[in-house]
Every structure is written in C-alpha cells, then in structure tokens.
Image (cartoon, rainbow, N blue to C red):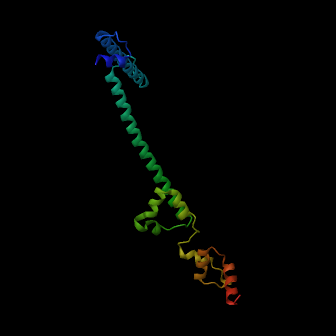
C-alpha cells in the first residue's frame, strides 16, 4: 500500500509513512482551502461579507434560488397574460374585418379562440387571410351585379374560386357556345 501511495503522490522510494501522511494532510489542506475560496467567491457574488460562514453562503444561495423560482412564475404569468391579450386582439380584428363570426369562434368548444392564443401565426393565415364577410351571406347578395345576370350561387362560386364575376360570365358564355 505504501508503494502505491508513493506512486500516487509522486514521492521517491525513500519516503516513509510520515512523508506520505504529511503529503496526504497537505493535499487535504489545499482542498479545504480551495473549497473555502470557492465559498468566499460565491459569498462575494451574493453580496455577503468576506467572513461569511458556509451556512450563510448556503442560505444566500437558497434565497437566490427561491427568488429565481418566484421570478420564473411571475414571468410565466406575464407571458400567459400577454398571449391572452394578443389572442383577444386577433379575434377582435377578425370580427371587425368580417373574417369570422362569433358563432364560428365558439364552435367546437371555442377551438378558433384557442388557436388565436396557441398559434397566432396560423390563426392569421387561416382566418385573417379570408375575404371580407366570407361567412356572412348578406353582403354577398349586396355585391351582386344584376347587369351580369349571375345567381347568388354563381357569385359565391366566383368568390370561392377567386374569379371575377366578369371572367366567370365570359367563360360561361364560351362554354355555352361550344367554344
């Protein structure tokens, strides 16, 4: 065992038990000093006095940990609050611009309202990119142009396909004439 300790500590063959013991004690002293130095550095980072005890440093670390947990909770609450505000604003914009109706928003247990909160970008693509008043049948009839002679169903088809009523009528005439 002494031979192995000499090798571990890097001592010569003449080193006996007292030298090995002294080396072990020195290593333990250095290690303890390094630990105290680390505690002093942590204490200084926490704003504690240089003479702070290990218990005081531990209490300081625990206090910082508790404060960080409280801050994380507050941040999560604020993020959630902000998401809800943004979702409400998206829903209001969609309603104001005639992109949806309250009934549609409340269908399927309010999934569209949740979508506005959980995935606002997809809500924008899905709802806000719609044509105005797409879900409200009244304005479609108001937009019909009687001189074109299209029915409400044909006007709706134009809207769905994204074709102007004039182009639809022109293409319909070509089809009727066999062209």
Spot occupied by residue 161 in the image (x, y as percentages of width and height): 61, 75
Number of dots carrying numbers = 0
Residue at screen point 54% across, 66% down: 99
Spot occupied by residue 97 in the image (x, y as percentages of width and height): 57, 64
Viewer-proximal residue among 80 and 20: 20
**Whether residue 14 is situated above or below residue 78 in the rendered picture:** above
Residue at screen point 42% across, 22% down: 41
Spot occupied by residue 51 in the image (x, y as percentages of width and height): 37, 16
Spot occupied by residue 158 in the image (x, y as percentages of width and height): 62, 77
Q: Quadrant of residue 42?
A: top left
Q: Is residue 139 left or right of residue 76?
A: right
Residue at screen point 33% across, 10% down: 15
**Whether residue 139 is situated above or below residue 74 in the rendered picture:** below
Q: Quadrant of residue 155?
A: bottom right
Q: Quadrant of residue 3?
A: top left
Q: Is residue 85 left or right of residue 171?
A: left
**Whether residue 74 is situated above or below residue 122 in the rendered picture:** above
**Whether residue 97 is situated above or below residue 65 in the rendered picture:** below
Viewer-proximal residue among 68 and 90: 68
**Viewport quadrant of the C terminus:** bottom right
**Viewport quadrant of the N terminus:** top left
Viewer-proximal residue among 36 and 160: 36
Q: Is residue 91 left or right of residue 27?
A: right
């Amino acid at each position: 065992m002494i031979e192995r300790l000499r090798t571990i500590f890097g001592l010569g063959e003449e080193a006996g038990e007292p030298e090995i013991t002294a080396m072990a004690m020195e290593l333990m002293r250095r290690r303890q000093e390094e630990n105290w130095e680390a505690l002093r550095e942590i204490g200084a980072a926490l704003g504690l006095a240089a003479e702070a005890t290990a218990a005081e440093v531990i209490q300081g670390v625990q206090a910082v940990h508790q404060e960080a947990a409280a801050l994380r909770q507050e941040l999560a609450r604020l993020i959630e609050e902000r998401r809800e505000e943004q979702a409400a604003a998206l829903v209001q914009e969609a309603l104001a611009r005639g992109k949806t109706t309250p009934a549609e928003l409340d269908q399927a247990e309010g999934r569209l309202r949740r979508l506005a909160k959980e995935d606002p970008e997809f809500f924008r693509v899905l709802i806000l990119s719609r044509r105005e008043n797409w879900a409200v049948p009244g304005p479609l009839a108001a937009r019909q142009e009687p001189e074109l002679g299209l029915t409400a169903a044909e006007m709706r088809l134009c809207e769905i396909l994204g074709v102007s009523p004039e182009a639809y009528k022109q293409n319909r005439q070509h089809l009727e004439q066999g062209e």
